[in-house]
Structure formats: structure tokens, C-alpha cells
Image (spheres, grey):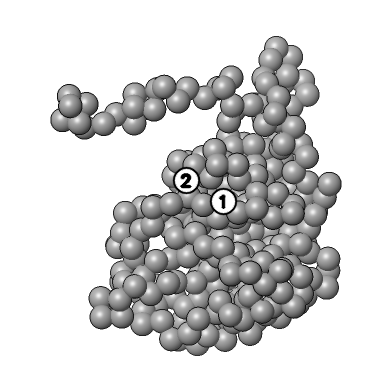
Amino acid sequence: MTFRIAVVQPIANPIGSEEKNTADAVGFIERAAAEGADFVCLPESYPGPWRMPATYDPGPAMAEAAAKHNIHVVYGTISPISSKDATAYNLTCMAYPDGRAPAQYSRTHPNGPWLYTGGKFWEFQYVAGGEFPVFDTKHGKVGLSMCSEVYMPEVTRALALRGAELIFMPAGVDKARLWPTWRNLIWSRAIENLAIVVTTQNLFNHSERGLAMVAAPEEILFESTAAGMFVVHVSLDRARHMRSTQDGLGCAQQYGAKQGVLGPQWQRPELTDVIYPRPQREAAE
């Protein structure tokens, strides 16, 4: 069974006028639905806000547009904790077509708060989350993450082990020298988790190089460096089949990635403490 994902790589409004991103996002949602999309994926921190104190909340507009146009909307915002301390969680959210409260993932990696302080775009004291929720939809189980968490394979592995088949990893801005490794890792996260992984980013002008991708375990289904909205046909059937079967002699003739890597043929949970050794003090207790 196939469905459609609209991947949006927008020209974002400049910092200082980013509240205008909300109206632009609603326009993308309407266009995506008109083109038959079941999901629309917006970048990290889009529609925003990008800074504390947070001056607006795009959540109600995203939820209203998702319900109006019968589409899932993956978007980025922050959740303020303390205006005085300028602390906030960084969120990837998903609004539902049935109007229920949006799903939320609070970025877990790396340790805060340095990641979003003192830069050109973001300015808040990031507080890391500590949970890996997954969310049911009629098309499949969704996991949410974001941006440079692509360099932490534990994040998408945690989601996949909880059943996520479709993982959205929206990202921030032009990747500069990181672009080749970032692109590699998006596909790697799909390969090692037998999942569909979706990413996109903000552009601030057409001279910047984007990284919009939809990666399946055996192939990259779509990629573009340009600004725009791109509708991609996706099926989870092959990934589900590869999750439910085992690797064997001769499988390389039929499969472009290893089967069953989330199951008992490959997983060794009894080695968790060997892979991630506890401090000696704890081990001695």
C-alpha cells in the first residue's frame, strides 16, 4: 500500500520576522493536501519560534490546518520552560488529520544547552528531553527526531525498537562541510533500522544548498538541494517484509540491505552493558 509524503524545503523568513513562517506553512499544508499528500514534513524550527522569549505558538494553526485538509503535519517549534532563564525544549511535532492534540518529541541529544546559544539563528537555553515516543497512524507507526541527532544512531534505533517504521528527522539550516556525511547518515539510519527516513531543512535564499531526502533501506527514493515542495510516493511494504524475515545465504541477490536486523537473529540485548559499560562503581555494586 502506498501513500504520499510532501517534503517541504522552504525559503524561511529571516530571523526577526520568522512569525510569518506560520502563514507560509499553512499555505504549504493546503498545497500538499491538494496534491494528495498524506503527510507533510516541514523543517526543524519551522514555523518556529527560533528564540526565547517565544513570541508566538504555531501549534493551533498547524493543528487547525491538519484537520481542515485531512493531513498529518510534521513541524518544528520550541516549548518554553522559563522565560527568566530562557530555557526551552526543542520539539518536532506532528498534527493529526482528526484534530487530536499534536504528537511531540523533545530533542534528546546532545546534552544541552550549548547547541542553540550564541548562534546566528537560534537563541535559547536548550534542555534535553529523555523519552522516545512513537505514534500510530493509519499508514504506519511514526517516530520523530531532528537534525544532527542523525549523528547519534541510538536515537533512531530507540524509535525503531519501539516499532517506528516511518521516521521524520527534519533539520535546521545549510549543512556546509557536513553535507556529504549528513546525507550518508540519513540513508544509513534507514538501512540499519529497516525504516523510511525523511528529512528536509530551511533555506534562507536560493544560493544555499538544501538536503531534502526520503530514504528507504535499499534505495534513496527522493533527494533535492533546491527550495520547494516535493510529493513522494512511499510504501512500507518492503521494509515491513525485511523486518519480518531473516538474512541468509544468497540473500544479497534479492535484497539491498540486511533483513531482520531489529530481531533476535541480530540483536543481542544481553550484551547491552558490554556495549554501553556502566561506570566501575556501579558495576561493582
Name which residue lies at 65% across and 64% down.
41
Q: Position of residue 154 (x, y in %)?
A: 45, 41
Spot occupied by residue 280 in the image (x, y as percentages of width and height): 18, 28
Quadrant housing residue 52: bottom left
Viewer-proximal residue, 115 or 274?
274
Question: Label 2 is placed on what type of residue?
Answer: Val
> Is residue 227 shown to the viewer in this render?
no
Instruction: Point out the frontmost of discs 2 and 1.
Output: 1
Q: Foreground: 120 or 115?
A: 115
Q: CA distance from mark 2 to mark 1?
A: 12 Å
Mark 1 lies on residue: 134
Describe residue 214's horizontal placement relative to residue 118 as left or right.
right
Nearer to us in this view, 246 or 64: 64
Query: Which residue is tagged 2?
Result: 155
Image position of 244 with respect to 110: above or below: above
Q: Identify which residue is drawn at 50% across, 87% down.
A: 17
Ranked by sequence position, the earlier of labels 2 and 1 is: 1
Mark 2 element type: helix
Q: Quadrant of residue 42?
A: bottom right
Residue 184, x across and y down, in percent: 57, 43
Task: Classify 134 as above or below 277.
Answer: below
Task: Look at label 1 and name its amino acid.
Answer: Val
Mark 1 Cα-neighbour bin, 10 Å: few <14, some 14–19, many ≥20: many
Q: Residue at x 25, y 80 (%)?
A: 84
Position in image of residue 268 (x %, y %): 47, 22
